[in-house]
Image (cartoon, rainbow, N blue to C red):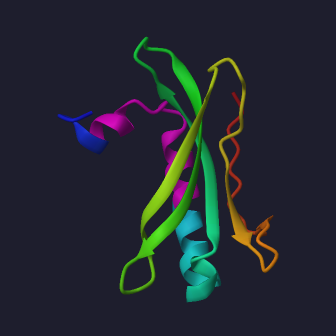
Amino acid sequence: MLAGGMEYFWSLFHPDDIQLWIKSLQNLMQFTMTELNDEQRKKMSYTWNYRIKNADGVYVNVVQNTTPLQFDEANKPIIGLAHYTVLHGAIEMDICASAKYLNDNNEYEKCTIKIFLILIF
C-alpha cells in the first residue's frame, strides 16, 4: 500500500465491481452537489460496498460508511471519517450505495435518491 498507494488498492477490487462502484460514487457526489444545500451536506453519511482481494487472494465483501468532516471552497466533501466492515466473500451482496441525513432529532434517515446499483453474482 505504501509503495503503490490508491492505484494498488483499487487494483485489488473485484473486476465486476469497479464500474458499478465508480458509478455509485459518481451518483452520490452528483446528489450531494445538486440536491443538498451547504448545511445539509454537513449532516450526511454515505454507505457503499464492494469486493476486494485480501492477502490470501480471496475476495471479501467490504461495507464502507463515510461521513464528511471537511469541505472545500465549493462545499464539496474532501475529508471524511470512514469505518469498514469486512464480511466473508461467500456472502452474496448486491453492489449498492446509500445516503443518510441526520435530522433534527439526531437520527439518520435514508434519502430517496437514484443510486442503487445491483450486481447479480
The question of residue 18 being in magenta is answered with yes
Q: Residue at x 63, y 53 (%)?
A: 47
Instruction: Look at the image and tell me in which quarter the N terminus lies.
Output: top left
For this orientation, the residue located farthest to the top is 56
- Residue 46 place in picture, x, y as percent: 62, 59
Q: On screen, 120 above or below 105?
A: above
Q: Is residue 106 above or below residue 96?
A: below
What secondary structure predominates along the stretch shown in magenta?
A: helix
Q: Position of residue 43 (x, y in %)?
A: 63, 74
Q: Position of residue 8 (x, y in %)?
A: 29, 35
Q: Is residue 19 magenta?
A: yes
Task: From the top left corner, tell me how far across and down residue 19 is, in percent.
Answer: 50, 46
At 49% from the left edge and 57% from the top edge, which residue is drawn? 81
Q: Is residue 99 left or right of residue 8?
A: right
102 shown above or below 52: below
Write the start and end of the magenta stretch as one range. 7-25
Query: For the view shown, which residue lies furthest in the front direction?
Result: 105
Give me the residue at 53% from left, 21% from top.
Answer: 59
The relative height of residue 89 versus residue 40 in the rendered view (above or below) is above
Write down the quadrant of residue 115 in the picture.
bottom right
Q: Is residue 95 left or right of residue 112?
A: left
Residue in the image at 53% along x and 58% along y:
25
Residue 74 occupies quadrant: bottom left
Placement of the C terminus among the 4 image quadrants: top right
Outermost residue, left side: 3
